Amino acid sequence: MKNKRVWGYVLALIFCVAILVYSLLVLRGREYYYVSLAIMLAGVILFILGFENRRPSVAELTIISVMCAIGVVSRVSFFILPQIKPLAAVVIITGISLGAESGFITGAVSAFVSNFYFGQGSWTPFQMFALGLVGFFAGMVFRKVPVNRFTISIYGLISVVVVYGGIVDINTLFYSMGEITWNSVLWVYGTGLPMNLMFGISTVIFLVLFHKPMLSRLTRVKIKYHLIEQEKESRL
């Protein structure tokens, strides 16, 4: 069962990469709504795989919906401050508390919905996939690694600067440069690094300030609705 679940994760993530490559090379940034919906479909598949031994409860779906809403509001509320957004911190905390699958779908949905305010475009699927991976890897990493200020800060900085920035800047590279060369790659990632660092550092600050209260409240909710026992059963 566990091997099937892992292979399901791998195939879902490969599907996301394939659809993004297709968007770059064939669609040329067009039809980004369809590409975004395909990324969300992959998130739903990941979410379903997390419940292979049981059905998700209404309480779980409600909590994830609330975290998606918090992610959207947290991004829109800080619209006046470029790259200073709590969104990645919310996604990371969701992944840690509710699991990798929930982290992915929260990141993908939050990016998609909040872009109705900031603007949709060819960058949307890349932001969705990148934020989804930030939440997904948080759920995977912190299954084994203890959660404290140091570990969550290191993860927050690396995941945002390397994973999020690295993926989203691919869109910029393809649609802002006439020809892709080593110089253009260095220029895009070099000019994007200060903004990615700003996003990463702000994510670290929000994580340090809010990870304990948010995780403790999510834990209380999980205990109240008997979700912790169900998590243990699903991992057996």
Image: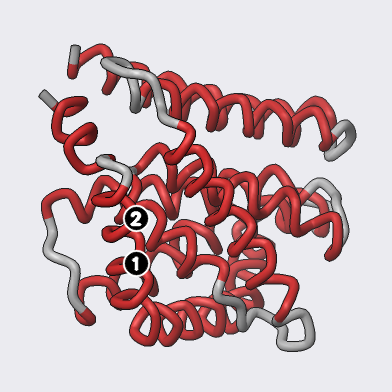
Q: Which mark is residue 104?
A: none
Front in this rendered view, residue 196 or 6:
6
The quadrant holding residue 129 is top right
Relative height, residue 71 to residue 209 (above, below): above
Could you say where residue 163 lies in the image, as x and y percent from the top left? 46, 57
Q: Residue at x 55, y 75 (%)?
A: 86
Relative height, residue 86 to residue 54 (above, below): below
Q: Which residue is mark 1?
A: 217
Q: Which mark is residue 221?
A: 2
Relative height, residue 41 to residue 185 (above, below): above
| Mark 1: few/some/many CA within 10 Å (<14, 14-19, 20+) | few
Please give left or right for residue 80 compared with residue 227 in the image: right
The amino acid sitting under disc 1 is Arg
Callout 1 touching callout 2 (CB < 8 Å)? yes
Q: Residue at x 65, y 79 (%)?
A: 83
Q: Secondary structure at mark 2?
A: helix
Front in this rendered view, residue 22 or 123:
123
Front in this rendered view, residue 101 or 153:
101
Could you say where residue 27 lies in the image, as x and y percent from the top left? 84, 29
Q: CA distance from mark 1 to mark 2?
A: 6 Å
Q: Secondary structure at mark 1?
A: helix
Could you say where residue 204 lies in the image, as x and y percent from the top left? 40, 81
- The image shows a total of numbered marks equal to 2
The quadrant holding residue 21 is top right
| Mark 2: few/some/many CA within 10 Å (<14, 14-19, 20+) | some
The amino acid sitting under disc 2 is Val
Q: Residue at x 48, y 49 (%)?
A: 63
Q: Residue at x 58, y 47 (%)?
A: 65
Front in this rendered view, residue 172 or 219:
219
Please give left or right for residue 226 compared with residue 104 in the image: left
Could you say where residue 138 lies in the image, as x and y percent from the top left? 33, 54
